[in-house]
Amino acid sequence: MASTLSFLVINTEVVDAQGQTFCPSSSCGLLQDIRYPFRKQGDPPGCGFPEYELVCIDSKAIIHINTGRYFVTNISYTDNTFWVVDANLDNSSCPIPERNQHPSIYGLQSEDITLLYPDAITWAAFVSCSELIGSNAISLSTSSYSVMYKPIDCRSTKNSLVYVFITSFPWVGNIKPSCRYLSMIPLGSWHVRAPNNASFEDVIKFMRNGFAIRFPLQDEHWTYRWVINTCLNDSISYFYTQISSSSILNQSLAIAGIDLHFLRCVNDYSDRTKLFWAAVAVISVIDIVKIMIGFAILSRFVFAPLAVLTFLAYKYWKTRISIDAVEKFLQMQQALSPTRYAYTDITAITGHFREKLGQGGYGSVYKGMLPGDIHVAVKMLGNSLCNGDEFISEVSTIGSIHHVNVVRLVGFCSEEMRRALVYEYMPRGSLDKYIFSSERSFSWDKLNEIALGIARGINYLHGGCDMQILHFDIKPHNILLDNNFTPKVADFGLAKLYPRDNSFVPMFTVSGCYCWRWLGDGGTWTNMQQGEARLTTQLGCIVI
């Protein structure tokens, strides 16, 4: 605080000399040469300052400080002080000030905040105690000075013992626990000081003579430097007094309230003139700089690590999302590969065959779900003419089919006589629901697209696989549609598998007529099954 507030000790120049040249001096009784910054009541507004206005009553100059009235006995423009006597001080032999005579009583709550500051270095403090403090004088040691309590017998009663002591500091926070504060008054000036062991009679003499008050001229550089230095030293003293306290509240006030304490001191001297506002501006700038420095320190040691940790956490989260996406994709791919399931798995996948999709010549179809929310259609085969090995062989071959227009075989089940095929689920159902319905119809372009898709699927089965697959049951019921109405060939119940180099299909594999196919270069005709011709006929029926 001391280093920052020292910036205020600058060449602050506030020139406000209205009336200094154009307002003549005046007098009141024995008080002569009343001039700037003083003014008499009735002078033009530009002459002097309202805070230094004197009222001349019965040849006595009276100045009002807060709610108090004081007689002005002398003005010294050399050292910028004037002497005042409390006008309310009675003429008895046992006078006591009725109110605080100091601008700010530290350690007490007081509304007596003045714009003028005493030039005295000693003060007389009056207290009322419930217990007797010694027979004559008691020394009360504080952190930096000691005081001697002097009894005031003329003001004391049996239950209230009044004492006075001399202090060199403008606060009375260290009084005896059994005492309560009454009032305080400055004594003398910087050069005229009351002794520490002064009796009440000595204090009366000092009060009758009054005390000096310094008035800072608004156009003198040294005055402002003096105000700044005085308030700076006062604030430092306040800081060390509060920080040395055992109370956490006082220590907090020492740190948080020192700026306000300094500004209050400057305000007491400067009456919210440009000096005060200059101090406010400088203190504000200093506080802003301190906040920026504190923010920079926090940014370096708190915010920066938090930002790095947040960034690393974000990167880790993004990486986990990517890894999870890959894992989900791999799980999906694994789920879409032909997998052998136990019958108990089939039961779990279908939810104990809860939702039935349809019934065909080779069994019933149920809706199921694999891990990863993958919907499937499970066909339970009610009758199988082939043995177990043939079933596994055919399933393995059909499961290797990967074409956009062929329903993919996801898995199968073969336990004793219980057989099941697990296909990918087609939410749009079969083609016959649309072509045989008057309410559901396709445009010619969509019909053409569907027909081409069916043809591509059949062509892939015939020539795109390691084994030739003859479907033998192409009809609208066995053409399924996905969400985008993409056709997929399904239901390989009558399908047969043949090697790609096998030119002959046995007659007993299908029923129907014969067809002839030209084989090889020898021009030999062989008797073969009418498979491809039959499929072509079936496809033509669908298109028509």
Image: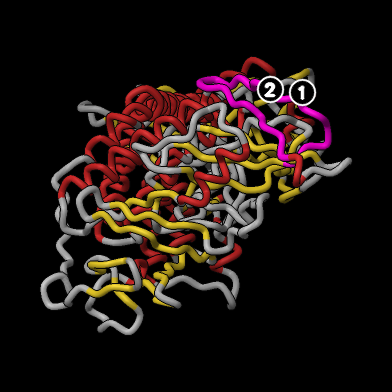
Relative vertical location of residue 534 with respect to residue 495 in this rendering, above or below? below
Near mark 1 (Cα within 10 A), the count class, few <14, some 14-19 or many ≥20, is few
- Residue on which disc 2 sits: 138
Q: Is residue 382 left or right of residue 220?
A: right
Q: Secondary structure at mark 1?
A: loop
- The N terminus is located in which quarter? top left
Could you tell me which residue is drawn at 58 percent across and 69 percent down?
A: 436
Could you tell me which residue is drawn at 37 percent across and 22 percent down?
A: 301
Dots 2 and 1: beta carbons under 8 Å?
yes
Q: Residue furthest right?
A: 158
Give the x, y percent position of residue 139: 64, 20
Q: Is residue 73 visible?
A: yes
Q: Amino acid at mark 1?
A: Gly
- The disc at residue 41 is none
Give the x, y percent position of residue 503: 37, 27
Q: Which of these two is toward me, 394 or 63?
A: 63
Residue 414 belongs to the span the image colors magenta: no
Give the x, y percent position of residue 341: 69, 22
Q: Residue furthest top?
A: 389
Q: Secondary structure at mark 2?
A: strand
Give the x, y percent position of residue 226: 25, 42
Q: Which residues are magenta?
A: 128-152
Q: Which of these two is toward me, 496 or 84?
A: 84
Could you tell me which residue is drawn at 79 percent across and 43 percent down?
A: 156
- Residue on which disc 1 sits: 134
Q: Is residue 401 visible?
A: no
| Mark 2–mark 1 distance (CA, rounded to whole Å) | 6 Å
Q: Amino acid at mark 2?
A: Ile
Q: Which of these two is toward me, 346 or 362?
A: 346
The image quadrant that residue 385 belongs to is top right
